[in-house]
Amino acid sequence: MDNKSNGSYPKHAILARQLAALGRDFYARGWMLGTSGNLSAVAGSEPLRLAITASGAHKGELTSAQILQIDEHGAVMRGKGRPSDETRLHLTVVRERGAGAVLHTHSVWSTLLSETFARKGRLPIEGFEMLKGLNGVQTHEHCEDLPVIENSQNMEAVSRSLAEALKQYPAAHGVLLRRHGLYTWGRNLDEARRHVEIFEFLLEVVGRTHFGSV
């Protein structure tokens, strides 16, 4: 189904190209190897339309044709295939944070640290200049608490846990899924991309320090 009438179609085409390029870039950086990770951006708000990666898409070879458009319930409005299995999580972040884009990477450091700090329920990151790259952060003395939530094949349960974590940590710019990686977001795709780059840098620094591999 083409949904051109609400103006989301032209924006979707632009976002599809941008998301495909972003997927290839993150693959090259080792943050979304194989088919791991997923990317989305809001293409329309009334009604909600989300551009999102199709399930099973290899991020190193991602094309705009592999970016679907879905509605607020996850139903495909444009494109062929099915959306990411974690679509519900993207919709949860958009709803709870008013995000314009949601990005999920699956890097080595985010995976390791999500397991290491799972019992504590959060990963605190403090004292690094790079924290100032997060929206609204003015000083390196900021402490960024990254909630860590349990992963599951039951996306409805994970979505509930995610919504609870977002409410518990209203200032958080990201969430870690245990043994699964990072979710972060932004007001738009550029800000969300910046948050990925900031977090992946910080996670590697923290990881190398924690595991003594500096």
Image (tube, helix red, strand yellow):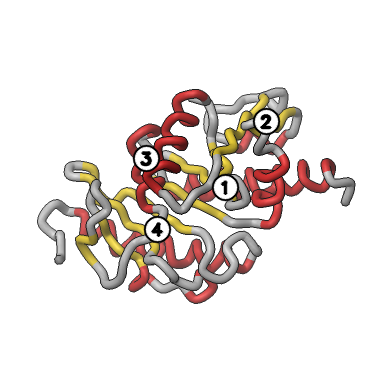
Q: Name the residue under label 1.
A: 182
- Counting from the top left corner in percent of width and height, residue 1 is at 15, 66
Q: Which quadrant would residue 52 be assigned to in this image?
A: bottom left
Q: How many marks?
A: 4
Q: Which residue is drawn at 47% across and 48% down?
A: 190
Circle 3 — which element?
Answer: helix
Q: Check if mark 1's residue and mark 4's residue have beta carbons within 8 Å.
A: no
- Which is more foreground, mark 1 or mark 4? 4
- For residue 160, the mark is none
Compared with 144, 30 (above or below) is: below
Nearer to me, 24 or 59: 59
- Which is more foreground, mark 2 or mark 1? 2
Q: Which amino acid does label 2 sit on?
A: Lys
- Counting from the top left corner in percent of width and height, residue 20 is at 44, 66
Q: What residue type is labelled 3?
A: Thr
- For residue 85, the mark is 4
- Residues packed near mark 2 inside 10 Å, few (<14), some (14 to 19) or many (20 plus): few
Q: Distance between the Cα atoms at labels 3 and 2?
A: 23 Å
Circle nearer the N terminus (4, 3):
4
- Residues packed near mark 3 inside 10 Å, few (<14), some (14 to 19) or many (20 plus): some
Q: Check if mark 3's residue and mark 1's residue have beta carbons within 8 Å.
A: no
Q: Name the residue under label 3.
A: 92
Circle nearer the N terminus (3, 1):
3
Circle 1 — which element?
Answer: strand
Q: Distance between the Cα atoms at labels 2 and 4?
A: 27 Å
